[in-house]
Structures are given as C-alpha cells and as structure tokens.
Image (cartoon, coloured by chain):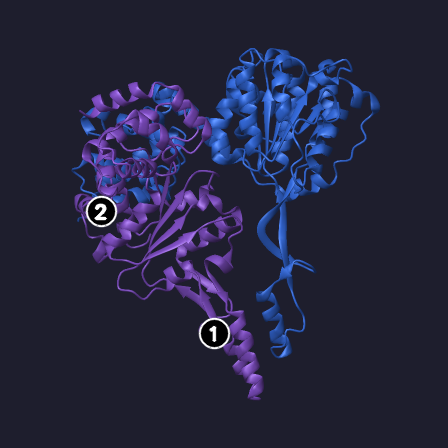
Chain colours: A blue, B purple
Amino acid sequence: MNAPGDAIVRRIATFGGLLRHAGVEVGPGRVLGAVQALQAIELGQRDQLYWALRCTLVARREQLPVFDAAFAAFWGAEGSLGVPTRPSPRERGEDDAATAETVVQAARRTLGAEEAPDESAEAADRARSTAWSPDERLAELDFAHYGEEELREARAVIARIAGAVPLRRSRRQAPCSAGGTLDARRTMRAAMRTEGHPLERRWRAAKIVPRRLTFLLDVSGSMEPYARACVMFLHAAVRAAPNVEAMTFGTRLTRLTPHFGVRDPERALAQAARAVPDWSGGTRIGESLKAFNDGWGRRGLTRGAVIVIVSDGWERGDTGLLGGEMQRLARMAHKVVWVNPVAGDPDYEPTAGGMAAALPWIDVFLPGHNLRSLQGLADALAAIGDGRRTSRGRVGAL
Amino acid sequence: MRRPVERSAAGAMSVEELTARLAEQSYLADRGLATVLNVAITLRKPLLLEGEAGVGKTQVAKDLAAVLGARLIRLQCYEGIDVAHALYDWNYARQMLYIRTLEAEQSAGREAIGELFGPDFLLRRPLLEAIEHDEAVAPVLLIDEIDRADDEFEAFLLELLSDFQVTIPEIGTIRAVERPTVILTSNRTRELHDAVRRRCLYHWIGHPTLEREIAIVRMRAGDVPDTLAAEAAAFVSRLRTLDLAKAPGVAETIDWVETLASLGDERLESETIDVTLGALLKYHEDIDRVRELDVGELVSAARKAVS
C-alpha cells in the first residue's frame, strides 16, 4: 500500500485542528497516528476511514459525539459516507438528540475534568492537621446567617477541615520496618551482603490509602442558605485529596468535580453556579439518587466508598423510590453519611417524609449548619477506618 | 520522526480478510472493530477496548491470537498488582537451595553468588514473556481489566507501552525484538489516565445490532434451534431498552439460549423464561422488574421482530 499523499496528510491535520477547536485534545502524536493508520485501510472505503480516524483521534467515549459531528461536517454528510450510526438508543444516550453545538459544549465541560492537578502530598499534610480554632462566634454561627465577610473569614477554616479523608487498607504492599509479612525480595538482596545468609529479615505490609469519598450536595431552593458554604467545603475537599468526587442534585444530577480545577474558591463557586442548571429549584432526591446509582455507582464511584449526602431531606417526589435507592446505595457503599443542615435546630426530628424513608440506610447522621458541625463531619470521616460495618439505622450525633 | 511502520507478515491483511478469518474463529466483528484491529496490528500500537461487560472485549483478543497464529499472553489486573506479579520475580526458594548447595561444596565465591541473580533464577511473568518472546509471530498480549489495577501500576505500564523494553537492575535492559500486539480492556470502573489513552488506539464496543446478535448466538452457542436463538436475541435486545441495573450482554444472551435449549425449548416460551431469567439478569431488582412486565407480550413482540 502506498504512503499517503501530502494532500491527505494536510487534510487530516486540518481535521485534527477542527477537533481541537471543538475541545477534543488532539496533539501532533495523534495526528501522526491517524496518518499512519491510513496504511491499514483502503482509502476508497469511507467507513474504514471513519473507523481509522476515530480510533486514533478519540481517546474516550465522551468524545465520540463531538467526533461524529466533526467527521460529518468535515468529510461530508453522515448518510453519504455510509458511516454506521451507533447501535442502540441505550448506547447513544441523550447526546444524540442535542444539536452538534450543545454536544461540543458538553464535551468541553467533560474534558475540563482533566485539568485538576494531583496534590496528594499536600492533601496528606492537611489531613494531619484538621484541628482549628476559629473564633467562637464564627464557629457557632449558622451558615444561613453568613454574609460575604463571614464567608471569607471561614474560607481558610473550611479548607482545613475539608482535608480529613477516610482511609482504607490497600491490597498493595509497601516495605515497613517490622511486622507484616516477610519481604522475600528485599531479604534476599540484603542477604547478598552477608554471603547469602539471610541474617536480616525485611518486611512488607499493606499500604494505607485514602478511601474513595463522594459528596452528593442538594442544591434545591430549601437548601439555598447553606449552598455556598457547602460548595466551598466540597471544593476544598476535592482539592485536598485524590479520589474525592462532588456531585450536586436538585431535579437533576451534575458532576462538579471537573469545575473544581481552579484553586480559588470564589472562581470555583462561580464555575459551579454556571455548571449547575437546577440551582435553587425543586428537589427530587429519589430520582437523583437513582440517576447516581445507575450512571456513576456502576462505574465505581460507590463501591467501597464513603458517600456523604448533604441535604435537608425535603423530598417532593416519591419517598418509596428514595428509600429503595438509599438501600441500593447503602449496599454498595462502605458507609453512608447524611449531613442535614436543618438538623442543627434543637427541635428537629428526622420525621419529614424523605428523611424518614432514608434513615434506615444511613450509618452516620450529622447536622451541618455551622463550622462546628462541619468539624464534626471531618472527625466522623477521619474515624471511618477499616473496621467492620456498623449496623445501619443508628442515628449519630444529633 | 520514526520511519514508517512496516507491515509484519501476519498483519498484511485487508479489513475484509480479517473479518472473515475472525469469523472462522466464531467471532463476528463488525466493520468498526475489524478496521480498528487491522490498524492496531499494522501500526503495532496498543488498542484500548472499552465497553459494557459481556460484549466480547476479552474474547476478541483470544480469537485475534488464533487468527494471527500467535500465542496469547494474558495479564489479569487486580488491585495491588505490582512488578513482581506482572513482570518478573526471583525464585527465592531456589536461590536459598543454591546457596545451601554452594555452602556444602565450600565453593561460595563471589561469582557463584552473582549467578543467583541470573536468568536461571528469574521467574518470568506475563509482561516479560511478551517482551522476551522468541516465536516467529509476536504474541498477542491481553491486559485484561486494566481499570482494576491502581494508578501506580498504570504509570509502570505506561513506560512499558511506550518503549516495549524493561530494565531489570540485576540483569540489564530487555527490549522486544518484535512488538507484541497489545490489547487492553476496561470496564470503566475507574477513569484511566490520559497518558495511557494517548499511547493507545481507542475503541468502544457497544451492544450489537439485532441481526448481528442473532448471528453471534447461532455461531457461539452450541447446538440450539435457529428460531429460539433469533427470538431470544430479539427478547434481550428489547430488555436492553428497559432501565435495568445491568443490561445483559451478548455473553448472557448466549448463556441464556443454551439454558433454554437444554430445557428442550424450540421457541421462546413465557413459562421457561420465568424460571431461567437468572441466566440473563444478575440483579434481583432487574428480575423483579421484568416479571412485573407482561412477559407474554414481550415474547410475541420478539417473535414478530424476527419473523
């Protein structure tokens, strides 16, 4: 087969530029790969061209709609190319219904996810120093009564509190000074220094790593007074450790984690506000949890994780559904923590429809109306170790 | 820029030819998958396959190896997998015995001890085997369920995938004479790092179309009645449009059809469906969900779809 001509190479480079413009990260390496891939196909076969370009220029499933739109626009209409449409409605998801423009926008948002840098070392430092001493007034003041100034003052404290992460024992082992199991490899190497006699034994033990932590924040109208402080907390938590995810829900589920790439909480807050379409709207907790269980739970955000739901439990939808989805969640997760800002009121009883339905599936129930109670959440998270499950339904510090 | 990649003897195939030869192995690849595989073989680039469980990601690697006449080397990933499990380890028990023997012979010189970390005491794990192979046709290396391994292993794999060479401190650098064909699979339980994706070709395998699924079932299931295979495939493809916790994959369809056939069914029957749903659906909620529906109606819809 002939090497591809200059014209086609230029055309593919231009196509790569188009994809880049649409938000798909296509570097020179990928373009080169695409050009090389032409050797494996018959250039006359336009569907082969489609697949060859697709597998070299696309790196994740979320980019497929953008690629398809760009391919159709650049290489001619979909029909005339004989490009197969993707198999079933289930595969296609909702994106296909949207116009190419909104698809491009959505893809950009998804792709923004990769900007978040890894700061695990910093996170570990912060986790170790969660102690704080803000002035008492600020510590006890209900978030609902916060003004701009209080929010600014609380920022550093929130960031410090949010560093607490639950830990778990990893299957991966690391060298340790004593205890654990014999490290045959290192023992043997050490024995080389003593004429092959393993005088000094070396050990290895399971590493302790951060457990996955997923926050689900209610942003419905009734939660509005608490939303800003909560988003600030989530932002700090996501940035403090790897494996932390933040989602919001009201009438629909939105993943916030990608928008927390920026360090400045104010900018993160602004980005979050833009990203969440159902801010201060209604609540359908059950449906949102179902969307989470279906879409993200199966992809590993739930299994073995600590799930923290921040909500007042005002369910406008079906409380039966909420109970069922809480059960599904509780069965997959390591621990389910529910933080209820309204529970800061001494007269509060968790009897409202939604809250009562969810309660049997909650491991730890906490108020979350001020800095003091957030510290309580941090302590609870740090205390979740590798221990056995506690029985559900026990209501924690009310 | 590197010189253009040369086609190996095994890779000199058209997409049609590859499709036909995979079909001989009872694997029905659609046009997309066949093209992508051909690109991967030709460019000697690793291929990352993603898709729901049970759509045939692992199977295609096995059948591709058979088509190429290559050895399949499989590395199953899991949390905590490390160099000692994936690449190489030393045979410590043998090393200790050797030391004792040397002692008994009073011949434990420095050179003898140096031999302890030579090829004789090296345990070759899948990745090293794939790089060090001496066969005429480079093996197919299947790195299965890479999403189950952790970040640290991914970083290690990254090095391997870019150069196909490994350095063993005690022995030196080992480089692949001919690059193996590498297929990675992921069920997306964890997002893979971009750097890994950058080094791989990417392909998403979805559920097959109805016609293709019928053909796959007929080909892969043992001796089953044609009507049963077709109706069952239609039934399953309808189930996938429901909002199930885990939609059945082709693998489940095949299991189910074999179950039905073993009960002596020639066609889809509501009564046997009810008792065999467990071969198809793996969540209690999903089974309940389907039982709540009018199964009789689903059956007649499935029959109509393939008649």
Where residue B36 appears, as percent x and y from the top left, is 28, 42
Across and down, in percent, residue A190 comes to: 62, 71
The quarter of the displayed image where residue B27 is located:
top left
Relative to A204, is B143 above or below?
above
- Dividing the picture into quarters, in which one does residue B223 lie? top left
Q: Residue at x 54, y 16 (%)?
A: A320
Query: Looking at numbered disc 1 in the image, what kind of residue is underneath it?
Result: Gly
Element marked by disc 2: helix
Q: Which residue is mark 2?
A: B22
Is A366 in front, or is A234? Answer: A366
The quarter of the picture where the C terminus of chain B appears is top left
Q: In terms of depth relative to the viewer, which is nearer, B101 or A266?
A: B101
What crowding class fits label 2: few (fewer than 14 Cα within 10 Å), some (14-19), or many (20 or more)? many
Which residue position is annotated with label 1? B118
Q: Is residue A94 left or right of residue A86?
A: right
Q: Which label was assigned to residue A305?
A: none
Relative image position of residue A284 (x, y in whole percent): 54, 15
- Most distant residue in the right direction: A136
Mark sitting earlier along the chain (1/2) = 2
Judged left or right of residue B186, residue B253 is left
